Amino acid sequence: MTYSIVARDPTARMFGVAVQSKLTAIGALSPWARADAGAVATEGWINVTYGSHGLELLASGLPAAATIER
């Protein structure tokens, strides 16, 4: 089982992401974060392009819900 949490503090303009899994070294592939953009957590059958692509969309100003839909 893998689960993750992504958090945002709009006042401090900070993001955080954490992942827990039975899979070894999943932390090297699942959590993604970028200053002034956001944080993304991928799970399950990881497609590593989701993290970088998601951050690009967030950095461009796309809202989180629309980023997830894409």
Image (tube, helix red, strand yellow):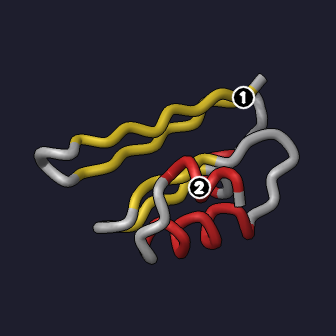
Q: In this view, does 24 lie to the left or right of 67?
A: right
- Residue at image coords 23%, 41%: 9
Disc on res. 39: none
Q: Are marks 2 and 1 in contact (CB under 8 Å)?
A: no
Q: Is residue 22 left or right of residue 28?
A: right
- Residue at image coords 61%, 71%: 52
The answer to whether 2 is drawn above or below residue 64 in the figure is above
What kind of residue is marked 2? Ala
Q: Name the residue under label 1.
A: 2
Q: What secondary structure is marked by label 1?
A: strand
What kind of residue is marked 1? Thr
Estimate the spatial distance between the alpha carbons at disc 2 and disc 1, rounded to whole Å.
Answer: 24 Å
Image quadrant containing the N terminus: top right
- Residue at image coords 82%, 40%: 44
- Residue at image coords 78%, 36%: 23
- Nearer the observer, 29 or 15: 15
Q: Name the residue under label 2.
A: 66
The local crowd at label 1, few if under 14, some if 14 to 19, many if 20 or more residues have their Cα within 10 Å, is: few
The local crowd at label 2, few if under 14, some if 14 to 19, many if 20 or more residues have their Cα within 10 Å, is: few
Q: What secondary structure is marked by label 2?
A: helix
Q: Where is residue 10 in the image (x, y as percent from the top left)?
A: 21, 45
Q: Where is residue 46 in the image (x, y as percent from the top left)?
A: 81, 52
Q: In which quarter of the image is residue 3?
A: top right
Image quadrant containing the C terminus: bottom right
